[in-house]
Image (spheres, helix red, strand yellow):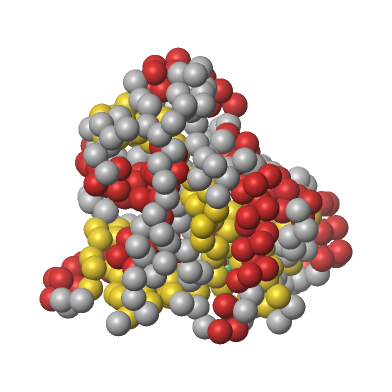
Amino acid sequence: MTAPAGPIAPGAVIGILGGGQLGRMMAMAAAQLGYRSHVYAPEPREASVAAQVSDAYTQGGYDDEAALAAFAASVAVVTYEFENVAAAPLAAILPHAPLHPPARALEVAQDRVNEKSFVEALGGRPAPWQAVDSAEDLDRAVATIGAPGILKTRRDGYDGKGQWRIMTPADAEALALPATGLIYEGFVTFFGEFSVILVRGQDGAVQFWDSAENVHESGILARSTVPAPAAIAAQVPAARALAQQVAQALDYVGVLTLEFFATADGPVFNEMAPRVHNSGHWSIEGAIASQFENHVRAILGLPLGATDLVTRGAVMDNLIGDAADSWPALLADPTAHLHLYGKAQARPGRKMGHVTRLVR
Ligand code: AMP
């Protein structure tokens, strides 16, 4: 039984792989619609902020096929909030419950080489890149593509982790390469960054949220603003067309995010995430249906809610590390929607919460 015959009715349990804040907000959206959530993650229950708002929790490894199968047998559908899960063991889920989005989306998105090749095959344009497995490869890549550029791990990178800026060929020479697959990308000169977030239902219909302009600090998203300025908005249709093709090619169900650089030559693809995304958190208050609600609706086979803005715009600021200590001031602002993720410890660079202000 992999394909549900029709919508899964309220009361059912959604299985979520990953125990972080995206799973937490997914579980909260599921609860609003009368569903329960069962979170599966490797960390102890006390360390999962998704577990705090979920009905059940399984502590298990993402490669533990027996535990994944037992988990799948106890839920109506499985989804994920975290893309660095190996795809192969997820086959253990399929005899017991449908998996949305498909494992293929993980395979493509979790490896920067796969991701860029996949998008290029669909006509998308990433920064010039080369796979790097040795110091010689890096020298060759820097010679071909030029510097400045960024060396990134192919896998497991997020929020600017696993990245090294190479300003000159000498920087490349001096670098002690980590023993893992890498990719060298030319540095893109952009005037802005934006994301395309879409939801694709089980009938193949696609809806987009407004694209936010995203500002990163030290490789971590700091602020998302909708609507984006006109110069960025002009690049959104081409970016949406690519995102829609990606979703179709993967037979995708759920929320999918693609990030772009806005350049003088049009949109340059940066990366994709097969999941709800930090740059879409504004949609909780700013859209008729949030990215979390529509993800839940899509994986359950329910009709999708409208993605339109409910107001003129929205600004979402991440609360990173100590910034969450400003909660008294944020609560004293009667128009600020404060979200804290329930994390016990603030560490530098750790996403502790976010705050959204609607533009009226
Ligand atoms: P990533 O984790 O690859 O999305 O990188 C995090 C951030 O680093 C991006 O959002 C950009 O601000 C910056 N960045 C990453 N790759 C490049 C690139 N090839 N050229 C310029 N900036 C980049």
Question: Quick check: 132 above or below 187?
Answer: above
Residue 161 vs residue 262, the one in the foreground: 262
137 w.r.t. 309: above or below: above
Task: Residue at 38% x, 77% y: name it.
Answer: 313
Task: Name which residue lies at 63% across and 57% down.
Answer: 243
Question: Which quadrant would residue 307 be assigned to in this image?
Answer: bottom left
Q: For residue 79, which quarter of the picture?
A: top left
From where the camera sits, is residue 116 visible? no
Residue at 28% x, 35% y: name it: 10
The reply, left or right, for residue 75 in relation to residue 137 is left
Say whether residue 322 is left or right of residue 332. right
Residue 318, given in percent of the width and then of the height, sits at 35, 67
The location of residue 327, given as percent across then percent down, is: 18, 68
Tell me if 156 is positioned left or right of 33 in this view. right
Residue 117 visible to an observer of this rendering:
yes
Judge whether 77 appears above or below 81 on screen.
above
Residue 109's spot in the image, x, y percent? 61, 46
Where is residue 184? Give x, y as percent.
Answer: 73, 58
Report the image quarter containing ligand 1: bottom right
Q: Nearer the viewer, residue 133 or 276?
A: 276
Vertically, is 87 above or below 180?
above
Query: Residue at coordinates 30% horizontally, 82% vertically from top-left?
Result: 360
